[in-house]
Amino acid sequence: MTCFYDKLVFARRKLFIGGVIMNKHLDTMSAAVLHRFGGPDELILQEVDQPKIGPEDVLIGVAYAGIGEWDAFERQGGYAEMLNMNPVFPYILGSEGSGIVIARGENVSNVDLGDQVYAPAFLNPNGGFYAEYAAVNAKYVSRIPDGLTMLEAAVISGVGITALRGLEDLLQLRQGESILIFGASGGVGHIAVQLAKAMGARVFAVASGEDGVAMMEELGCDAIVNGKYWDISSMARKFAPSGFDAAMFTAGGEAANAAVNYLRKGGRLVYPHGIHPELRLPAGLRASGYNGEPDPEIIARLQRYISQYSLTVHIDHIFALKDANKAHEALQKHYVGKICLKVKEPDLVLHGLTDSQSG
């Protein structure tokens, strides 16, 4: 049976005719689209035009698309209203994903045709990853590092960048410090746990449910609390008698509002914008809300952490592209880690690449 690597080599050989890179491909694709903003049921599968690439863009044959809580806000029209955007319908969601390079613009040199890649594409003007193809500026596109599967790569960008931005850039977390991570079993949280451990911090994780606790145990947290049922206060005081040096909150609610008081005097707290319910922060607390916006520097930094510390990502549910509406319904229920769309088998993406070059 021919392995994926052999197929990739074969595909690359077919990409060159007389020394010229062939970028021919089909004109339409299947996508989960919106014709108006609203609830999960507004997501429907239909054939649409493939995105066009400019000289700085990469066309990715999508294998998997990550689904984030921010996707629901975008689906509802939240970002369009907040940023005074003029959305064009049909509208394609999908702020991160992975796949294979199908075509590239004339100025692109960081990836080759046939490369397995992943990328964030938050509010991408060319459309998102809930589609068979996505056109993304090359500065956001990276080869998938060794040790990370294409499935994992699809869902790690958004949560990884958000976690890293908060821990390293804002908290400036140092070796030996104690950190409370509230919402540790969620998408951002479980990557933040791994990054904080890599930075040498002592991690106190507040997870959700027994499955969240089990995941934290696998990740080697120093202390774990089931935020749904356990007494967070007594365990926190035992772990950090003088209070925590730092905290990251990725979820809100009454337990979170109580937990913000577990920091020591002068402790630092960060939270990504958009957590709901909003945190109630006492006066005088050093707290910073922030956005996990991607840029080439932090993408490269995350890539180094993935490679050096073997970061992993937990995927709780995988849905087919046609069931994108069901995936968005799952966002409203209990889950740990991430949710993902399976757009197309990687072998089929590669098959499409070889077919598009044979004509």
Image: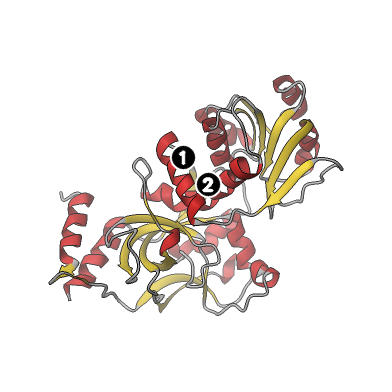
Amino acid under label 2?
Gly
| Sequence-earlier tag: 2 or 1 | 2
The residue lying at 57 percent from left, 54 percent from top is 330
Does residue 106 sit above or below 204 in this rendering? Answer: below
Q: What percent of the width, then of the height, locates residue 72?
A: 61, 61
Q: Which residue is mark 1?
A: 305
Amino acid under label 1?
Tyr
Numbered marks: total: 2
Q: Nearer the viewer, residue 322 or 242?
A: 242
Q: Are marks 2 and 1 in contact (CB under 8 Å)?
A: yes
Where residue 328 is drawn, which disc sits there?
none
The residue lying at 72 percent from left, 40 percent from top is 269
Q: Quadrant of residue 250?
A: top right
Pointer 1 local density, CA inside 10 Å: few below 14, some 14–19, many at least 20: some
Does residue 316 sit above or below 102 in this rendering? Answer: above
Image-based side of 306 in relation to 235, left or right: left
* Residue 335 in sight here: no
